[in-house]
Amino acid sequence: MTKPRAEAEAQMCLMRQGFATLFPRTRRTVRAASGMVVRTESLFPRYLFLQTDPALQSLEPVRSTRGVSTIVRFGGEPARVPDAVIEQIKARIDLYDGFVRLAAPDLAPGTPVKINEGPFSGLDAIFSAAHGNDRVRLLLTMLGSEREVILPRSVLGARI
């Protein structure tokens, strides 16, 4: 576990000490005062993965590493993430830019969805159709009638 917004610093310091790390990041488009901006965010805020064998490499230096808050433990033992989970995360990392690509949910027309971001945040809608690779057409009930809106796919939450 890292200090707030110190994942990159912790990763760099741990790598200098000879530890293998994984710091999965993603890009997300958000509305800002200046318009829509693309932000780089940690896929798991305040966490990064450390690969080591405690029998071969002491974990003591990790706790005092710049940017590190603590080592996550369960019952006194360092938490272990199954190799299959790490491999699935690595498989989603784009080799071109190094960011994790999150799969958009597969939706069929008529599927109820919730909007999680933007001016329609919190509203329920009905998926109508895909509109390009990263946008969707949704039907919203507003002011007693249905309206079709086109929004980024990233604003959709879980199915209702």
Image: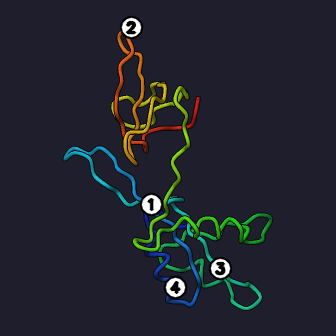
Q: Label 2, on which residue?
A: 144
Alpha-carbon span between mark 3 and mark 1: 21 Å
Secondary structure state at the residue bearing disc 1: strand
Residue 79, visible in the rendered structure:
no
Q: What is the x, y in percent for residue 38?
A: 32, 55
Task: Identify the mark at residue 15; answer none if there is no mark.
Answer: 4
CB within 8 Å, label 4 to label 3: no
Q: What is the x, y in percent for residue 20?
A: 59, 83
Q: Label 3, on which residue?
A: 51
The part of the image, by quadrant, that contains residue 71 is bottom right
Decide: few, some or many residues near mark 2? Use Cα within 10 Å; few <14, some 14-19, many ≥20: few
Q: Quadrant of the C terminus?
A: top right
Residue drawn where x is 47% and y is 68% of the image: 94
Alpha-carbon span between mark 4 and mark 3: 11 Å
**Nearer to us: label 3 or label 1:** 1
Alpha-carbon span between mark 3 and mark 2: 56 Å
Alpha-carbon span between mark 4 and mark 1: 21 Å
User: Along the polypeptide, which appears first: circle 4 or circle 1?
Assistant: 4
Q: Label 1, on which residue?
A: 26
User: For this view, does 114 lie left or right of residue 74?
Assistant: left
Residue drawn where x is 40% and y is 48% of the image: 133
Residue drawn where x is 50% and y is 30% of the image: 114
User: Along the polypeptide, which appears first: circle 4 or circle 3?
Assistant: 4
CB within 8 Å, label 4 to label 2: no
User: Along the polypeptide, which appears first: circle 3 or circle 2?
Assistant: 3
Residue drawn where x is 73% and y is 71% of the image: 78
Secondary structure state at the residue bearing disc 4: helix
User: For this view, does 148 lie left or right of residue 75?
Assistant: left
Secondary structure state at the residue bearing disc 3: strand
Alpha-carbon span between mark 4 and mark 2: 58 Å
Q: What is the x, y in percent for residue 135?
A: 38, 42
Q: Nearer the viewer, residue 131 or 7?
A: 131
